[in-house]
Amino acid sequence: MTGDLHCHSRHSDGSATVESIVSYAVRLGLDYVALTDHDTMAGVDELCERGRRAGLGTIPGVECSARDGRTGRPVHLLCYLPRNRVVLQAALDRTLVSRAETKWQMVEHIMESYPLTRGDVLRYSRESASVHEPHIMQALADLGYTNTVIGPLMDELIGKNGSCYVPNVYPEARDIARLIQEAGGIAVVAHPGQFDSLELAEELARDGLIGGIECHHPRNSPEVTQKAIALAARHDLIVTGGSDFHGQFAKRPHPLGTCVTDGENIRRLLAAAGQ
């Protein structure tokens, strides 16, 4: 038994519909798939219903944006199987609003040099719970300024060192981890290699604030993967894996099923949530 427990759809910054993710997972022979859009669970009910019809196991999830209060670095916490979504989403909605505000500020800066309008961006963000970088870049691609959504122009304009970049304001990781617990969910530190999150993961694990760590991820180096597995063993954490699937909106291709969670850890995850 295997499952890809990290996927994004059009409800955040992915290019694929929930329907196509389910269809793709079935064709790949996956047993489980989790939808983990950024700071929203808007597509989860559809995922579960389509999965039920297709005979595919589904795990409701969300990827919560946060920051390490000590270093200021970003950190993402995957939340799986929350029993009280309302408690969780109330906090995540604040992140969605903050993200939209910063993205519209970026758009305003871009409009000073490019004939871009808010309507151009809204055309691509209307299915999403917020505005994300790919929506802005799709609009610029339509105007002929780039032929890639995730590429050099995005880095130049709205990458972290871009001329139009405006940083997001995210909640502290410990607060989000506690909120996930309050909602009855399982908190998992996502892709520790991407944001150098291993030290924070150790602290959160020691304080009993997480239940797992994403050891298998396209952005984890072999060294990070081994360190994450060792960390999981020290603290009896669930070892998860996922492709971080975004469809075509990714700098490097990582198709669904690139990284997976094995059957033992899927069972541990379900058991931890009382399923």
Image (cartoon, rainbow, N blue to C red):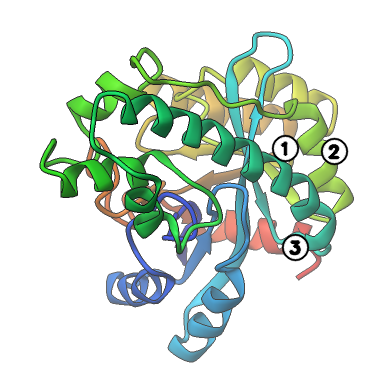
Q: Which label number is shown at residue 254?
A: none
Residue reaching furthest to the right: 182
Q: Residue at x 26, y 47 (%)?
A: 139
Q: CA distance from mark 2 to mark 1?
A: 19 Å
Q: Amino acid at mark 1?
A: Asp
Q: Give the labeled residue for mark 2.
A: 178
Instruction: Give the mark, 2 or 1, whose residue is nearer the N terminus.
Output: 2
Q: Secondary structure at mark 2?
A: helix
Q: Image quarter for residue 129?
A: bottom right
- Above or below for 115 versus 110: below
Q: Amino acid at mark 2?
A: Arg
How far across and how far down the image is residue 9, in percent? 43, 60
Q: Residue at x 43, y 71 (%)?
A: 18
Q: Amino acid at mark 3?
A: Ala
Q: CA distance from mark 3 to mark 1?
A: 14 Å
Q: Image quarter for residue 64?
A: top right
Q: Which label number is shown at residue 271?
A: 3
Which quarter of the figure is the C terminus placed in?
bottom right
